[in-house]
Image (cartoon, rainbow, N blue to C red):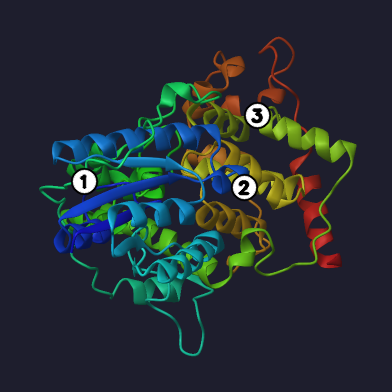
Amino acid sequence: MKASIVLYTSDLRLHDHPPLRAAAREAEKVVPLFVRDPGIEKAGFLAPNRAAFLADCLGDLDAGLRERGGRLVVREGDPVRVVRELVGSTGAERVHVAAGLSAYARSRADRLRAALEEAGAQLVEHEAVITALPPGEVVPGGKDHFAVFTPYHRQWATQRLRDPLGAPRQVSVPSHVRSDEVPRRADVPGVSPALAEGGEREGRARLAAWCRGGVGRYEDLHDDLAADGTSRLSPYLHFGALSAAECVRRARTTGGAGADAFVRQLCWRDFHHQVLAARPAVAHEDYRPRGDRWRTGRAAEREAAAWREGRTGYPVVDAAMRQLAHEGWMHNRGRLLAASFLTKTLYLDWRLGAAHFLDLLVDGDLANNQMNWQWVAGTGTDTRPGRVLNPLTQARKYDPRGDYVRRWVPELRGVEGRAVHEPWKLGPGAYEGYPAPLVDLAEGRDRFRAARERG
């Protein structure tokens, strides 16, 4: 075959990439293509932090392809139009792409398939490679997805994952195919100051270091806010710079309780993707409606603004929100506490919080972001929808010395020990500039429960 095209989407890597390997195996020339789709930007999916990380990933992918004799072809426009033009100019007979999971990705694939059929070419859609197991691989009898995590995990854990593929040794790209400039992080405004570096090379280095040491302590440290004992691999998984299947395999090779706990979190990720794949509407609608009449009005707006700014008066919540603004990332326990405070203490719509997270999270995607928010709000897959996470109790348990709070809330750095979690008890003069609590926790909890009972 003369030429094939590989359409990159959220799978920005060379290793364990079935579409790239298939194209390189069948054709003399391969066009590794990434299309900057205005539709993605208009939908708000490319906020500054993710745009900057994406630029890193594309630059690294281009560098890796050049080491193998090729290069990345970057174009801007409607992906269907761009691909069809390239089919015409290269004589490509096949276009390889990994299956997408969102409604937008499915629509794009349908349009692309129809356009290629008219052009006498074929779309080869490979299984989704952004998850360890493709959605639909394991399903309960008579249903299209699992609605509860534990039975899903039980079946998921018994499945044999595909063997990860190595990177191709050589990729030959037609010399006449032009490319736009590869985006650069430096050209993206509004990026969080401490945003991590993107790219497959960086992701694989972090994975190797994690498997050498960090994963062994994961069971003990993953909820310790100050210890920062999580993998921080989620941005690389989100952009497909790392293979989830390879992460599972490599973690299992290390063995131990830490590896098991880490793999369980990767299973959670697959679980949320299979829910969204089966029910695309839950990106914006309640998975399990509870009849909520979320608070609105000026007071609600002021409280939502204070939550976004990390000025709720509850230090552990504010620390998490400030970490998000500074790094474009937040510790998982912090995400749970911030989400619970917004939805169940302030009784504000989970969609407000999910949108703010998507504005800043470098690893923000619809499946994990929306479904985690719904889980906390009690409108999703949580089997205890009425649970309320008390930020003071949680802070004493997961930040017992207050180190996490002092790291992110400079107004309280002079407060010693656990007193930092309840600074209002210290009296005037103990600290300056930190706000009083927005709401009494008991009042917020009772308001939420009363609202759910009415619903």
Mark 3 residue crowding within 10 angstroms, few (<14) / some (14–19) / many (20+): many
The quadrant the N terminus occupies is: bottom left
Query: Front-most of 312 and 145?
Result: 145
| Residue under the point 52% across and 58% down | 367
Q: Position of residue 189 (x, y in %)?
A: 54, 23
Tag on residue 43? 2
Which is closer to the viewer, label 1 or label 2?
1
The outermost residue toward the bottom is 142
Secondary structure under badge 3? loop
Secondary structure under badge 1? loop
Q: Which residue is mark 1?
A: 173
Q: Position of residue 249 (x, y in %)?
A: 21, 59
Please state which amino acid type lies under the numbered disc 3.
Gly
Compute the Cα span from label 3 to label 1.
49 Å
| Residue under the point 35% across and 61% down | 98
Please state which amino acid type lies under the numbered disc 1.
Val
Q: Which residue is mark 3?
A: 310
The quadrant the C terminus occupies is: bottom right
Query: Front-most of 295 and 101?
Result: 101
Q: Position of residue 172 (x, y in %)?
A: 16, 47
Secondary structure under badge 2? loop
Q: Is residue 49 above or below residue 453?
A: above
